[in-house]
Amino acid sequence: MKDDYGSLGSRHQLLSGGRRAASGLLCAAEPTRHLRSSFVQPVSTENQPVGPPVGDRADTQRCPHRMLLLYQLPEDVLYHILYHLDCTSLSRLSQVCKSIYRFVSRDEVWRKIAKECLNTGITWDGTDIYPHLQLKERVKVAHNWFDGLCKRTIPLKWKTKLLPWLQLDGDMLYLSQAADIGAFHLCQDSGRLQRPPSEIFLGHQGDVCRFVLTDSHLVSGGSDGRILVHSRGRDTFVELSGHNQEVNCLDAKEGLIVSGSRDRTARIWTLSSSCPRDTIHMSDRVWSVAISPTLRSFVTGTACCENTSPLRVWDVERAECVCSLGLGFRRGAGVLDMQFETPAQLFTCGYDTFIRLWDLRLSPGKCVMEWEEPHDSALYCLQTDGNHMIASGSSYYGVVRLWDKRQAACLQFFQLSSRPVSSPVYCLRFSSSHLHAALATALHSLDFRQNNVYIR
């Protein structure tokens, strides 16, 4: 009788190999007195004088060939053994017995493998973004991200062409449509949206251009030039007035808000005041902005219609330019989106078809790495998993691309809109198992839990 992991004979060989490995380890560590063997040869009691129990005599005689079952090894020794196994070996080993299966399913066993996979939630510094999800299952789904195996759905459609924006927060998806922002619950099993939205954020007199989420607020900027700070869970908001044209971009962290506008200014705000703390006059329209995780600096990206670099780093306290990033940008190479991955590493993308990685600790004249969109399309948005994966949205036919930072070529791509109807991917966000992309007339979702790869 066979199963997905081979014949019974191969399972017997795996058990035998594990026993031999355990035997070798224990013979080398014979002084460990508390480890008792399940494989001690039975001692005949015929014609034997009455004495201590057999197990005690075995300990007294210190048999040099004692062995343990693999799962009877101390946990630190077993962790050390499993640390050197790949995912295929770990999955096969988990089929031996229930005890080993439970041990192998622990997150600590899979952490090293997960850090080398795409989008498992383990970041470059070892932080786990999704601690509530079993790491072994995330590694399985990571193989689908790598191979591009997913199920495509369109959870939401609308008739009028819009410039939507979206954000994910746990099991909630926030989507802007014209002047409104809806908060939708995501079904855990199917990944579908529960309609109608559980909450709608109103107040703008024009379309919402961008919005961001903090722990307690939703901050949005609109084509009416206003910034609204909504209290999450309460139907109240505070208006921040200062821009006289549409607010193209904004970012908010821990009470600090930075916005950029078509009026060629970047403004610094705090939650304690409705007026800007500082106003920075730029030579071009501001299309993207990102606050550093340290809160000491922020970066602006402009339309690059002047003979200056579109990327500038600013000091928050002094509201002064610290440096410009990059040299020799082509005219019109505007920066449409950016994201800090660490306080020193910044990702940018835009009209010049490149994703660039900048290290702010090094010379600002040149980026550290770059990835080029193969079809010469502008890149509207990007997101990283904090480790190896980048997802980008292109300007034509709703093309979403997945990139592995460790290689130059695109890893996978998905065309979400049909050939006659071309739409940019205005925004995308992903979790450990789903990717959501907002196009002009629909919200698209990719479920990477489908067709799971069973590691063998």
Image (cartoon, rainbow, N blue to C red):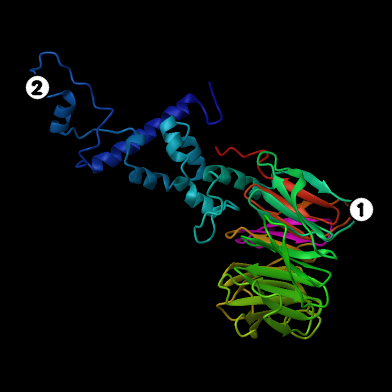
Query: In which quarter of the view is residue 168 placed?
Result: bottom right
Q: Amino acid at mark 2?
A: Gly
Q: Residue 347 appears at what percent x and percent y? A: 65, 68
* Sequence-first disc among 2 and 1: 2
In this rendered view, identify the residue nearer to me: 87 or 343. 343
Contact? badges 2 and 1 (CB < 8 Å) = no
Q: Is residue 301 above or below residue 93?
A: below
Q: Please determine whether, in this image, residue 154 is positioned above or below residue 380.
A: above
* Residue 413 visible here: no
* Residue placed under numbered mark 1 in the picture: 420
Cα separation, mark 2 vs mark 1, equals 91 Å
User: Residue 120: x percent and y percent?
Assistant: 57, 51
Q: Nearer the viewer, residue 429 or 124?
A: 429
Check disc 2 and report its element: helix, strand or loop.
Answer: loop
Q: Determine crowd level at label 1: few under 14, some 14-19, many 20+ residues with C-alpha closer than 10 A.
A: few
List x then y, in percent, for residue 15.
40, 31
Q: Nearer the viewer, residue 293 or 230?
A: 230
Region in magenta: 389-410
Can residue 259 be seen by looking at this rendering?
Answer: yes
| Residue 129 in the figure: left or right of residue 97 | right
